[in-house]
Image: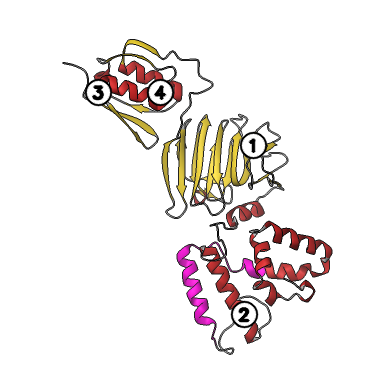
Amino acid sequence: MKNKAALTIENLLVDESFLNYYFRNDEADILEWEDWGEAHTDRQDLVKQAFAALDKLSLKWNREQIEAKFCALNGKINFDDETETPSIQVSYRKPFFQKWLAAASVILLMSAGWWFFKQNDSKSLIYKELVTNANVELIEKENISDKPLLITLNDGSSILLQKGSRLSYPANFEGDKREVYLDGEAFFEVAKDAEKPFFVFANELVTKVLGTSFTIKAYKGQKDIQVIVRTGKVSVFKLNEIQNSKNTIISEGVVIVPNQQIKFDKEKSNFSKSLVEQPEMLSEMPAYDFEFKDISASNVFATIQKAYGISIVYDEELLKECPVTASLSDEPLYGKLALVCNAIEAEYQLIDGQIVISSKGCKN
């Protein structure tokens, strides 16, 4: 906005730079408005009124609700002054209200991803709401650098926050839970405390752990959210499976273990579990000898399963008659599986985060 000295609510609601500031969608506009606010504290009430007006548009509607509201707003632009009442308590002049309705329509379109978020990027309204409603004072760290930002919590847990991501957390964890809030991507190494589980609220998902290491990717505008476990075990829940009053879990959630990952499709509201692209052996496990000579396939698969912490489904009785002689030490997981299966004329499939072996056995 060129002339901020003549600000009105009407102007703010249709100004793109101000909407960028409200949605935190453009760093230059955010910094410009924040600097202006610090220099013009006497105009902050006006900005707060505009924010309140935008908040009342309820951008947490789903796509169907947004489309319905947009159609309804379009139908009301030519309303009769004597029969219609605006939903926001601002000036009641018809020209202004027409302008406000047009602005509301634009904003609804923006939240649907049709104009404003040119790169499928939306304001993390869920993150903002969770942080605002937290019952303790939080510290927020945002990584605006090009390198990961290391954050150490008072319980000894550490978080590697990726570029463009935000994390909110209390200075000290009190009560029987440890709760932090993530918008973006971070790698967590959580200190073990069986009496005080650790919860990560990442927009639509909640991840519960006792002590483990894992990555969460919950970027703004991204179609899905990912949780990838390196060590330990985590349970993942939808946010609506948490009772907000006491953050009590009302579902068993989806459990994932090392070398597994889960994706949550936000549009379909469903989970899909799979193995990571390059599974690694568990660092806390003893070194395994992958030099096999006339060892039953059942024992080979059992060794692989323990080394990688991945469930392998096979018929133990059927495959104990299949001898395997192979050197697998330098092979990645899928290379090991391919060589063993080729030797015993079997096949493997990746199903729901598990490896399933299909074989007819080796008896003559």
At label 1, the amino acid type is: Ile
Q: Residue 276's quadrant in the figure? A: top left
Question: Is residue 333 rendered to the left or right of residue 320?
Answer: right
Numbered circle sitting on residue 305: 4
Query: Which residue is label 1 attached to?
Result: 159
- The three-letter amino acid code for the residue at tag 4 is Gln
Does the magenta portion include 301? no
Q: Which of marks 1 and 4 is nearer the N terminus?
A: 1
**Do the residues bearing badges 1 and 4 touch, measured as CB atoms within 8 Å?**
no
Asked which quadrant contains residue 44, the reply is bottom right
Mark-to-mark CA distance, 4 and 2: 64 Å
Q: Specify the segment rendered in magenta.
A: 52-79
- The residue under label 3 is 345
Q: Mark 2 points at which residue?
A: 99
Label 1, residues with CA under 10 Å away: few <14, some 14-19, many ≥20:
many
> How many dots with numbers?
4
Q: Which is more toward the observer, 248 or 121? A: 121
Residue at the far left: name it. Answer: 364
- The vertical placement of 351 against 283, above or below, is below
Mark 2 surroundings within 10 Å by alpha-carbon count, few (fewer than 14), some (14 through 19), many (20 or more): some
Q: Position of residue 80 (x, y in %)?
A: 55, 89
Q: What residue type is labelled 2?
A: Lys
